[in-house]
Image (cartoon, helix red, strand yellow):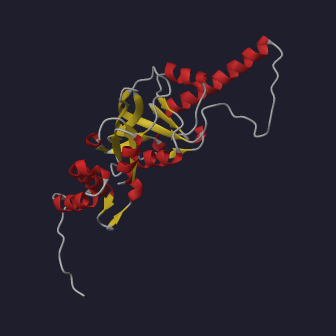
Amino acid sequence: ASISDTFLYSLDNTEALVEVAMTTLGSKIVNRAHRKMGQIAVDAVMAVADFERKDVNLDLIKMDGKVGGSLEDTTLVRGIVIDKDMAHPQMPKDLKDVKLCVLTCPFEPPKPKTKHKLELESVAAFEEMQAKEKDYFTQMIRQVKDAGANLVICQWGFDDEANHLLMQNELPAIRWVGGVELELIAIATDARIVPRFAELTADKLGSAGHVHEEAFGTTKDRMIVIEGCPNSRAVTVFCRGGNRMVLDEAKRS
């Protein structure tokens, strides 16, 4: 057997790869923007490719999207996009030079594993319990700030009191982030996922150049964009489309 044709490409000249991508997208619903879509597909693969091992880890490419705009508004984000917003509306929406901690532990006092019932028979008892809860939240926030973090990304939610204390202490937070997204954020920002507050130290924090909240469309759907990550190999293809069917077809293509 012999090689019938040689396919030349390089990091500086990806035109041949783009043409191949355009050919594969020609019959899809995205064909009206297939030049841009082909370029995005090639850029995404080249960003995560390991040329020494000749391997491409497609898990580092996240597909996401929002209904609204047109196919031509689809972009490649060299970072992570998560379908969340800041936990409190008064938290800052634009952060630079971010040190972030990734938590899988709940931002709340510990609870018994079994069913339990707590009866408070006086106002003083209720106030004492409330003060204890507040002290617990304050201690957790102090641990995060002492480690040097200025953004919290948590897998679990937290109640209004914890949210209010985070805002008062000028500590922005994002809650209810899924496990797959947490792993991608940890990879991109060089963070370690922290399962307990006692294990939180400065060397487990991740870093990002720019974290900001974006609003889309007339409904003002909000998403968090994490850019300027030290490990820029994690990328997000952020698709736009006029309706859900077009968006799903663009992501599938």
Q: Residue shown at 40%/47% (left/top)?
A: 248
Q: Position of residue 198 (x, y in %)?
A: 60, 39
Q: Residue shown at 53%/46% (left/top)?
A: 179
The answer to whether 167 appears left or right of 196 in the picture is: left
The answer to whether 144 appears left or right of 110 in the picture is: left
Identify whether 77 is placed above or below 117. Answer: below
| Front one among 71 and 59 | 71
- Which quarter of the figure has residue 12? bottom left
How many discs appear?
Answer: 0
Q: Position of residue 30 (x, y in %)?
A: 29, 50
| Front one among 233 and 221 | 221
In what quadrant of the picture does the C terminus appear? bottom left
Identify whether 247 is placed above or below 12. Answer: above
- Which quarter of the figure has residue 76? top left
- Which quarter of the figure has residue 15? bottom left
In what quadrant of the picture does the N terminus appear? bottom left
Q: Position of residue 152 (x, y in %)?
A: 49, 34
